Image (spheres, coloured by chain):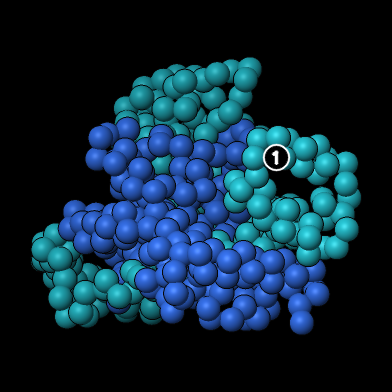
Chain colours: A cyan, B blue
Amino acid sequence: MSNNHLSDKIIRYHQGEMAAAERQAFEQELSSDEQLQQLQADYEVAQSAVDVLAYDELRSKLRKMAPPLQSSTRAASSWRAALSYRLAIAATVLLLLVAGAYLWWPTTSTPASLATSFYEAPNFSLVRSEQTNDDQLTALTTAWQQADYTYITQTLGNSDSLKATETQLLAHAYYQQQEWDKAIVSFTTLVDQQDERYAPLARWHRALSYLQQGQTAKARVDLQLLRGSDNAALRAQAGDLLEEL
Amino acid sequence: MSAPDNRILQQIAEGGKSLEQVMQELYTDEQCRGQALSLLLRMGGREQDFEDIFQDGIAHLIMNIRKEKFKGESSIKTYLLSICKHLWMNKSRQQANRKTLLVSQPLASETSTDSPEDILLYQERRQTLQVLLNKIGDPCRRILSLWSLSYSMDEISQLTDYKNAAVVRKKKHHCLQQLMMMVRGEDS
């Protein structure tokens, strides 16, 4: 049977243009006919191309909705006004600090700004474990995805015995809240446990937390140790950050 | 899920003019725009990057909802902000030309419900399918994109130069067949 004729059947099947009996017969044929299966795979690729076209169409429509460059929403303006005021004060203070710091540290970046630029928030996936069915962990990862760090620190902050995943969540929640001391304590717990799944990354994030606090020497120690890590990406990043420092 | 979110989901799934209406709504929502802008600025982005990121974010949101990848475990606005955040992170990584640190350690399996892990999906697909997409003529591109977004055949005939719904339906079928032939390498 020609490819065109079979392609036609594949298309009609996916468009819901077959009656129930024809559909059932086609599904049976599809399960055993290699030529049909290949055409099914071709259809899926074609559908991927159609998805990209749909995406481009959406972008095109949104581009036409874009406001003129000069205008901005009231909410965005109020956010920017508040931010501008704080930035103006911070800039004045920073100018004075940097002017003094430049006398003995003539670099273009501060340790804290380097840490900020190197930090990437983890993408904690939801646990799908049939064995544990841990509702609390599910709620915590949901809170993370919703940037509700207070929920995480309040839920886990006073617990004595946490699982490694919980410690990891807590550490990053503290980091996001800029509670560097507490973040360092949690990352240290993971480092000391020496579990290869968590310890190396925890050491990296502890180094970033030290930099946020201005404890550059302690950060360097962690980064030097990471230069010997089995994780190639971590080795590279530690090397990059040490060069910047 | 709140009632407004349910309505938005319904309109996006419906597609066509209904989808256009909700796109306009999301795009001009002041609170959402403000939060997204603030997030972008906090992450080191610039105001001039905002419109691009926000538009990409809404387009991804709509595609994910239509593909049933959004399971409703957060609000739509939270999901949109999360998508924008990941889009910015990816863009800033590309701009800095840094190696990607494998930060994400899945707590269990790779399957995540509301995770915007396929943020890059349409950019990546475009790179792979570019040869194919370049071969499709403009009429087929237009028909297939509108059909994929659930515009009715009547609506498509009004938006294009085709006479009526029946002609559009036939043309759409032909375009899909042509696309499949291109995939096989049998295009003439």
Q: Is residue A161 among what the camera can see?
A: yes
Q: Is residue A200 among what the camera can see?
A: no
Counting from the top left corner in percent of width and height, residue B141 is at 54, 74
| In this picture, residue B25 sits left or right of residue B130 | left
Please give the name of the residue rendered at 61% of the width and 48% of the height, measured from the top-left corner.
A17
Q: Is residue B121 above or below residue A169?
A: below
Give A72 or B154, whichever is nearer the viewer: B154
Q: Report the chain holding disc 1.
A: A
Q: Give the labeled residue for mark 1.
A: A23
Please give the name of the residue rendered at 83% of the width and 42% of the height, measured from the top-left corner.
A29
Counting from the top left corner in percent of width and height, residue A138 is at 47, 27
Counting from the top left corner in percent of width and height, residue A182 is at 38, 37
Q: How many marks?
A: 1
Q: Quadrant of residue A113?
A: bottom left
Q: Indicate the quadrant containing the N terminus of chain B: top left, top right, bottom left or bottom right.
A: top left
Q: Indicate the quadrant containing the C terminus of chain B: top left, top right, bottom left or bottom right.
A: bottom right
Tag 1, which secondary structure?
Answer: helix
| In this picture, residue B61 sits left or right of residue B181 | left
Counting from the top left corner in percent of width and height, residue A43 is at 70, 58
Indicate the amino acid at tag 1: Arg
| In this picture, residue A52 sits left or right of residue B46 | right
Give B108 or A234, whichever is nearer the viewer: B108
Give B136 or B36, whichever is nearer the viewer: B136
Q: Residues within 10 Å of mark 1 (few under 14, many from 20)?
A: some
Please give the name of the residue rendered at 72% of the width and 40% of the height, measured from the top-left corner.
A22
Please give the name of the residue rendered at 26% of the width and 61% of the height, measured from the top-left corner.
B24
